[in-house]
Image (cartoon, rainbow, N blue to C red):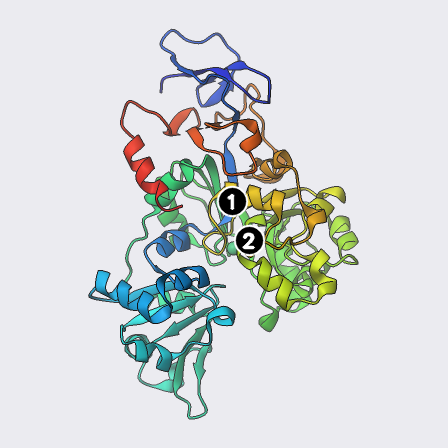
Amino acid sequence: MTAVLLRGAAPAPGRSVDLLLDGGQVSVAAPPRDVEEVHLGGRPTLPGLADHHLHLMALAASWDSVDCSPAALASNGGLAPTLRAARRRRPHGWLRAVGYDVAASGELDRRGLDDIGVGPVRVQDRTGIRWMLDSFGLRAVLPPDGRTWPDGVERDAAGQATGVLVRLDAWLGGRVPRSAPDLDAVSRWLADRGVTSVTDAGARNGPDELTTLAAAGLCQRLTVMTAAAGVTAPRGVELGPVKVLLDDDDLPGLGALRARIEEAHRSGRAVAVHCVTETQLVLALAAGVDRRDRIEHASLVPADVLPLLVASDPTVVVQPGLVPPRGDRYLAETDPRDHPSLHRLRSLLGAGLRVAASSDAPYGPADPWVGIAAAVERRTSSGSVLGADEALTPAEALGLFLGAASDPGRRRALRPGAAADVVVLDDDWDALGSSPRVWATFVGGRRVAGPDPGGRRDTAADARGRR
Ligand SMILES: [Zn+2]
């Protein structure tokens, strides 16, 4: 691979340096003779962005799906017209719809979907917890004998399936035809936004998922959390923490959770515990989450739990990008006394915790710059502000996306010897908090997005349409 010399790179406002990317690293050696020079003209030049928690397969699948979020339904005239239009584009087979919000758009079951008449169709609730199927779809996936149905198949008073399937995502996935999700498109789209490292947080990841993700040949560095501690990573994949998903309706006992954490630690793995409620957070801390580990989301951290979190000292991986799409609901549905506890940022940093950010895509917006802007503005989609005291400066918000994949709370910098993961912005420093344009992205010194005589520009522009 040819070395690249970035001339006139600005690692900070008002500074200009030449940055040599050679052998996969930032180098201070004299440039080799066959170096490719790229003139940046003082463009802001940063370490590549890391998304420390997202769901790559679900994100790719969501792009192959009908968007039924409240915003999409509003602009397409409601659920029935949206699904019927999708059926015209895809005349055969299953329709897969995502982002449906029961609270905003109404309860949905087999009957409601039958009335629309586009089956077989499956509609995922915005949380990813429920699927809602029409009668065609139900007949295709449910065994005829109701006694063999798994828990989670909701039944009406007569014992008939209502069409609602709760926490049966994997079960359902094994019963519908598989179409390979386009992970390459996801990877290129993220590269166009300066993302050079991703951590897949799938709670069910095992050998199959590791193989699929490794084979996808993403242009980002790839870290994968897994369900079990005792797995080996294929080439090209770093093992992340053991992912522990908690569900308030089905919480493990303290002893069982403690054993799971200890098993991970004995295998040299950290745990990453999903904590979106106070109960989940308190349970995780009581079960022995410590400085090696991660708390994912920390969506609700009451003031009296914050000192417990600090005492355990895990890295906290947050999703500021959820404030615009979900903030209005939080403000409407949670006790006003809890509002200061929601999606904390500044108070976590102020308490000395190591904090990193992520998208949780497709459950939150995949674009890291949307997350950065949200961390600065804290604005909900209707324009209210959620927790103004928790807002960060653009540089602080950016810093949350600059962690090392193996230790998200540790910030990377473009120092000699560091990995040559670089993003060059095509905007001024003052655009950091408002979705700046990305000019080029390098992973290990290899250009994965940006101006290139090889003609990558077209595909990059294509993918941008998905923003
Ligand atoms: Zn997640």
Q: Are marks 1 and 2 in contact (CB under 8 Å)?
A: yes
Q: How far across and how far down the image is residue 417, in percent?
A: 54, 21
The 10 Å Cα crowd at callout 1, few under 14, some 14 to 19, many 20 or more, is: many
**Disc 2 on helix, strand or loop?**
helix
Q: Residue at x 53, y 56 (%)?
A: 325
Q: Residue at x 47, y 44 (%)?
A: 367
Q: Residue at x 42, y 40 (%)?
A: 190
Q: How far across and how far down the image is residue 439, in percent?
A: 42, 28
Q: How far across and how far down the image is residue 226, in percent?
A: 49, 52
Q: Which residue does the numbered mark 2 point to in the structure image?
A: 324
Look at the picture and state if 319 lies above or below 142.
above
Q: Is residue 227 left or right of residue 449?
A: right
List the single residue furthest toward the left: 91
Quarter of the picture containing the C terminus is top left
Q: Which residue does the numbered mark 1 point to in the structure image?
A: 370
Q: How far across and how far down the image is residue 70, in percent?
A: 45, 63
Quarter of the picture containing the N terminus is top left
Tell me the quarter of the picture where residue 400 sits.
top right
